[in-house]
Amino acid sequence: MYKREETKPVFVGGVQIGGQKSVVIQSMTTADTRDVESTLAQIQRLHDVGCQIVRLAVINEDAARAIKQIKERSPLPLVADIHFDHKLALIALESGIDKIRINPGNIGSKEKTKRVVEACRERNVPIRIGVNSGSVEKRLLEKYGYPSPEAIVESAIDHVEILEDLNYDNIVISLKSSDVPTMIQTYSLMAQKRNYPLHVGVTEAGTQFSGSIKSSVGIGTVLSMGIGDTIRVSLTADPVEEIKVAKQILRSLDIVNNDPVVIACPSCGRCAIDLIGLATKVEDAISTLKVPLKVAVMGCAVNGPGEAREADVGVAGGNGEGLIFRNGEIIRKVKEDELFEELMKEINEMVDEQKPA
Ligand code: SF4
């Protein structure tokens, strides 16, 4: 469908970003990083739904030191989100952080930047340069008049060149804007300038509903142009929801196909069961499975199995009852209140069949 741009591979712990690997999903904790147990509990939840890299806010030295304990038990590679303070970056690195998000142009002196870069080089830790439309320097705002795609890219390149002058190319770049067309043009422009992996997202996208749509349109468009190596959906919601949306974006573009997917009909006047309730329950129940399985939840037997021919397993509602089907064939009829359990029986059986012996 589209060819992904070739990018330089970088490694965040054991996870590769770029170099034509599949697109990596990441999120950020909302817990106070100094609260090790709460942060770890949130990381575990993110891991369980499919997050691959997690970022932590490092607001002071205590938070930077807490990384050591978090790292010991974290199932995911960790990124330290640091603004300005090179000391926090150095402590985070000593604590075992896997990646740092800091803008070298904001560290202060060249000497401080050099110390951070050398500590990263020693440990093979990538640096993510993150420019947002709100963080574009005054000089560039005056030059371009507003945080235009050109201004955002030029700001990012200025930071990149600081690292390149120090002979450091273990770099990831993000260029976020809350305006979707700006964000799309910005990533497209950046992809022509450098081949460092790109972290794609729409910043301050909004609440669960509007943010999911904005992120899907923005991130989906950029990915469909073959650009992007890792994504973060930013929602004003539980970060677990960010992962669900990110997975759905990647599935919709066929970038990943190793997760279960629910195909559900919109329902119509022929439907005589609680289809919305059933589809939601099924989607929730299978969200943590890690197998490629298509599950159809259809409102009626007239069109259900036929419309869901591509599905591995599914239900088609009837009057107070429903049909269970596998590979497009009806296998039995059950009462409406047993539909969920009976469908899950089939799903679990198929999951077991796909497990290596
Ligand atoms: Fe309507 Fe049946 Fe089609 Fe669902 S599967 S939209 S209930 S005709």
Image: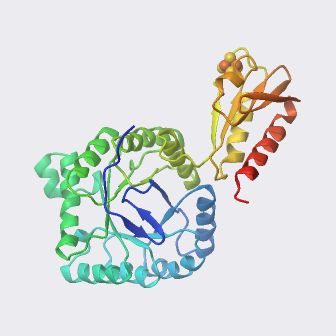
**Is residue 147 in view?**
no
Q: Residue at x 29, y 48 (%)?
A: 187
Whether 110 is drawn above or below 230: the answer is: below
Q: Quadrant of residue 110?
A: bottom left
Determine whether, in the image, residue 187 is placed left or right of residue 245: left
Q: Position of residue 43 (x, y in %)?
A: 58, 65
Whether 89 is drawn above or below 283: the answer is: below
Determine whether, in the image, residue 290 is placed left or right of residue 64: right
Q: Quadrant of the N terminus?
A: top left
**Front one among 46 and 293:** 293
Location of ligand 1 given as a quarter of the image: top right
Q: Residue at x 66, y 27 (%)?
A: 308
Whether 334 is drawn above or below 4: the answer is: above
Q: Position of residue 265 (x, y in %)?
A: 65, 26
Q: Quadrant of the C terminus?
A: bottom right
Determine whether, in the image, residue 160 is placed left or right of residue 264: left
